[in-house]
């Protein structure tokens, strides 16, 4: 290793030794932690691995669902439909590339990832528009892709211009890249040996029946309801479907292609899993561009093998797309910072704005992670290059250039997230519903709901003395994190002055964690979009020194962490991976017993009013429900009415049965939880029985009363008529009442 790294090693000195101590100490602390639930220490996983290598592991996994290669063919229709959606999305992305970024000297991985990601964002908007027009089918998707293809062909002339005229090279890290690190055969070999089979495992797992509560409550339930009704409309009973739904539109697209909500949901999950591969392309290419092939390949390896990456592929969360668009927008903005002012940079900024806006269209937090920091960073960059704020505004050309680029960036943001804000404004009077009610107001919200929402979704405290605990919760104790992210990422602070791009990545990551700590309720999933940036930083750690002992320490840590992550990710702790299971059997395995009973036993004419239950995606029957932050449908139908009026209300709503999930209601009413409508009490159902509105209930679920915690029993005993739910030691958690 020659050039810049040798003086770098001498200049760090004690800092490098401190980095080594940190790396070793962090890993020891990490592996000494338990998974909490279950209370198994990470170190025991190494013993499991040793038993497997020595052939001493005799445990057998017993499943009631048949499994084998004969069931692989069941996935072919899902892969075909997902492939079609990706081809259609590529047409949109290719069109944007021809018009906006064809002249930029992007690396292959950067260009492919940007084409794929921007194309999926456009396809999501196409589905939104088509759905609002009541046209949920494959036809508008194919038609829109055809239009993009024609537009892309008309922009072909842009790609014929020489990219050298732009004035930026493929490697523009200014001091981080050296000739010796460019080869990086070991890193490249390690990356490809793991990336190819692991990507297959990841994509295969994405075709697993959903199990997560949020997914079955709104991520997939919302698209299912729209598909069944044939149009996108306001769902008053499910406030979460008013969030920006970029990824959920891809699930709805899968349903439109498949003409079936169930297989379409799995198709959508497979498409969403592709975001992880697109993110890998951005991470590897950006790492190679700025820091060399070795760090780039290590960063990609760390990203792919972090358990969170597999987890957000198995579960249809929005974090996969949010992480991609945030990373892509930051990377492209940094690339454009080295491009001379002009049309090329302006068009590139339009795409940066579209990517940042797509991050916000995936989840509101994209405003904090991508839209605002990129805008602020670009303003600071303009002021620095113009010399001073005064100099900027005195120069007509500078002022015009700044306003033009600011306008293009803003236009990109508005194109991506504007339709979602407009949808909310029309439906509720609040463009960011259910957020910002204190500012925008709105007809579909009220002060009590707003107070409950803020209490449930805000940080519980902001004590600076607890920051170390919060850091350890994210970096060490989190079940699905990697020992490499923070172990290798933090020592890179020693390279702070070596690269502008590195400084920007560090600032973006720090800002992301600051907003996570200060402005959210600190769910671990909320910092997952920062994992690609952390992976990039971790990959750079190898550049701290060219010394053999340092490289050996880094590579030893990477190999150990990769082996650990891969083995851990095959456990059920990461999520349900159906593997080669029979898909229908796997589907039934994930459905709760009470819903299975209703699916099988209810007559076709039945309609069930669900009380306390919103996880209803698996239901094959007609139903009414509401989420915890919506007005109680049960209260609307039975409250403030005489016994003679209630049967008529229920009949008008088509309700034939009422299901009550007291377990869920207890979860919501525990201290610190969301709360639940006080109207819903056991005594209320007893009164409806006594006047002949409801019949004798059938118990579909129960648990041991003595196994509840003292706090849980105390909460239940505060309910009016709670005694009727407890029979001996059995607490009846799920009851089904027939309507008389």
Image: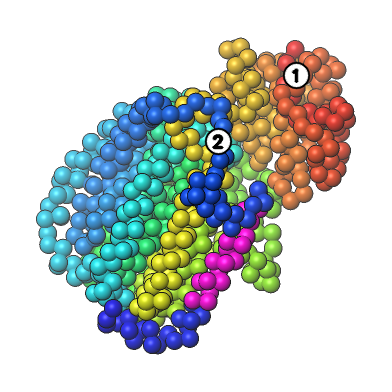
Q: Principal SS element in the magenta part? A: helix
In the rendered view, how is the structure colored? Answer: rainbow
Magenta region includes residue 29: yes
**Image height check: is 510 above or below 219?**
below
Circle 2 packing at 10 Å, graded few (<14), some (14-19), many (20+), is: few
On screen, residue 540 versus residue 511, left or right, reads left
Q: Residue at x 82, y 46 (%)?
A: 711
Residue 61's tag is 2
* Mark 2 / mark 1, whichever is N-terminal: 2
User: Relative to the observer, which residue lies in front, 670 or 201?
Assistant: 201
User: Relative to the observer, which residue lies in front, 371 or 392?
Assistant: 371
Q: Is residue 463 visible?
A: yes
Q: Which residues make up the magenta segment?
A: 20-37
On screen, residue 670 versus residue 123, left or right, reads right
**Image height check: is 624 above or below 212?**
above
Q: Mark 2 and 1 residues: CB-CB less than 8 Å, in contact?
A: no
Magenta region includes residue 108: no
Q: Residue at x 32, y 31 (%)?
A: 80
- Residue 201 pos. (x, y %): 40, 42
**Image height check: is 584 above or below 54?**
above
On screen, residue 183 versus residue 652, left or right, reads left
Query: In the rendered view of the protein, which quadrant contains the C terminus?
Result: top right
- Residue 198 pos. (x, y %): 39, 47
Pointer 1 residue: 698
- Residue 658 pos. (x, y %): 71, 22
Q: Residue at x 77, y 32 (%)?
A: 703
């Amino acid at each position: 290793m020659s050039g810049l790294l040798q003086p770098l090693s001498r200049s760090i000195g004690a800092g490098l030794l401190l980095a080594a101590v940190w790396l070793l100490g962090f890993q020891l602390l990490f592996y000494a932690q338990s998974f909490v639930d279950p209370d198994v220490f990470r170190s025991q996983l190494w013993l499991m691995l040793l038993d497997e290598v020595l052939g001493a592991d005799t445990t057998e996994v017993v499943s009631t669902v048949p499994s084998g290669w004969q069931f692989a063919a069941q996935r072919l229709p899902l892969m075909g439909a997902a492939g079609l959606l990706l081809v259609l999305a590529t047409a949109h992305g290719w069109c944007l590339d021809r018009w906006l970024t064809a002249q930029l000297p992007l690396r292959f991985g950067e260009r492919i990832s940007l084409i794929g990601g921007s194309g999926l964002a456009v396809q999501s908007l196409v589905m939104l528009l088509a759905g609002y027009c009541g046209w949920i089918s494959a036809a508008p998707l194919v038609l829109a892709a055809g239009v993009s293809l024609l537009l892309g062909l008309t922009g072909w002339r842009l790609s014929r211009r020489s990219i050298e005229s732009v004035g930026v090279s493929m490697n523009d890290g200014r001091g981080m890249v050296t000739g010796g690190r460019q080869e990086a055969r070991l890193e490249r070999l390690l990356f490809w040996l793991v990336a190819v089979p692991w990507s297959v495992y990841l994509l295969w797992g994405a075709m697993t029946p959903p199990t997560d509560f949020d997914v079955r409550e709104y991520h997939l339930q919302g698209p299912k309801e729209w598909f069944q009704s044939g149009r996108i409309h306001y769902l008053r009973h499910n406030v979460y479907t008013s969030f920006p739904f970029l990824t959920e539109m891809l699930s709805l697209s899968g349903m439109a292609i498949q003409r079936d909500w169930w297989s379409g949901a799995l198709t959508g999950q497979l498409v969403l899993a592709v975001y992880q591969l697109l993110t890998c392309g951005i991470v590897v290419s950006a790492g190679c561009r700025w820091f060399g092939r070795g760090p780039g390949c290590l960063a990609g390896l760390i990203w792919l093998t972090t358990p969170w990456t597999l987890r957000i592929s198995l579960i249809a969360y929005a974090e996969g797309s949010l992480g991609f668009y945030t990373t892509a927008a930051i990377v492209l903005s940094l690339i454009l910072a080295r491009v001379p002012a002009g049309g090329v940079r302006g068009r590139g900024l339009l795409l940066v704005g579209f990517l940042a806006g797509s991050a916000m269209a995936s989840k509101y937090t994209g405003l904090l992670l991508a839209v605002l920091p990129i805008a602020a960073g670009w303003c600071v960059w303009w002021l620095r290059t113009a010399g001073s704020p005064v100099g900027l505004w005195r120069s007509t050309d500078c002022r015009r250039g700044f306003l033009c680029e600011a306008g293009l960036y803003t236009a990109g943001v508005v194109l991506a997230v504007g339709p979602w804000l407009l949808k909310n404004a029309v439906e509720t009077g609040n463009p960011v519903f259910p957020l910002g009610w204190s500012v925008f107001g709105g007809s579909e919200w009220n002060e009590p709901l707003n107070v409950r929402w803020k209490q449930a979704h805000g940080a519980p405290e902001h004590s600076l003395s607890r920051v170390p605990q919060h850091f350890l919760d994210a970096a060490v104790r989190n079940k699905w994190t990697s020992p490499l992210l923070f172990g290798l990422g933090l020592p890179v602070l020693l390279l702070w002055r070596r690269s502008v791009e590195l400084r920007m990545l560090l600032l973006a990551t720090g800002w992301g964690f600051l907003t996570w700590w200060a402005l959210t309720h600190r769910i671990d999933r909320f910092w997952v979009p920062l994992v690609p940036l952390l992976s990039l930083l971790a990959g750079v750690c190898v550049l701290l020194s060219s010394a053999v002992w340092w490289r050996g320490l880094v590579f030893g840590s990477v190999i150990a962490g990769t082996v650990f992550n891969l083995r851990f990710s095959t456990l059920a702790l990461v999520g349900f991976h159906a593997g080669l299971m029979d898909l229908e059997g796997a589907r039934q395995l994930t459905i709760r017993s009470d819903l299975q009973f209703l699916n099988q036993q209810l007559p076709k004419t039945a309609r069930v009013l669900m009380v306390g239950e919103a996880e209803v995606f698996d239901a094959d029957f007609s139903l009414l429900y509401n989420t915890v932050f919506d007005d109680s449908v049960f209260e609307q139908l039975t409250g403030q009415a005489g016994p003679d009026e209630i049967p008529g209300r229920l009949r008008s709503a088509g309700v034939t049965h009422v299901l009550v999930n007291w377990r869920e209601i207890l979860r919501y009413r525990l201290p610190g939880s969301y709360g639940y409508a006080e109207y819903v009490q056991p005594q209320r159902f007893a009164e409806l029985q006594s006047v002949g509105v409801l019949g004798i209930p059938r118990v579909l679920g129960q648990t041991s009363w003595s196994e509840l915690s003292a706090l849980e029993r105390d909460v239940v005993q505060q309910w009016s008529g709670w005694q009727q739910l407890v029979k001996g030691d059995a607490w009846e958690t799920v009851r089904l009442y027939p309507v008389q």
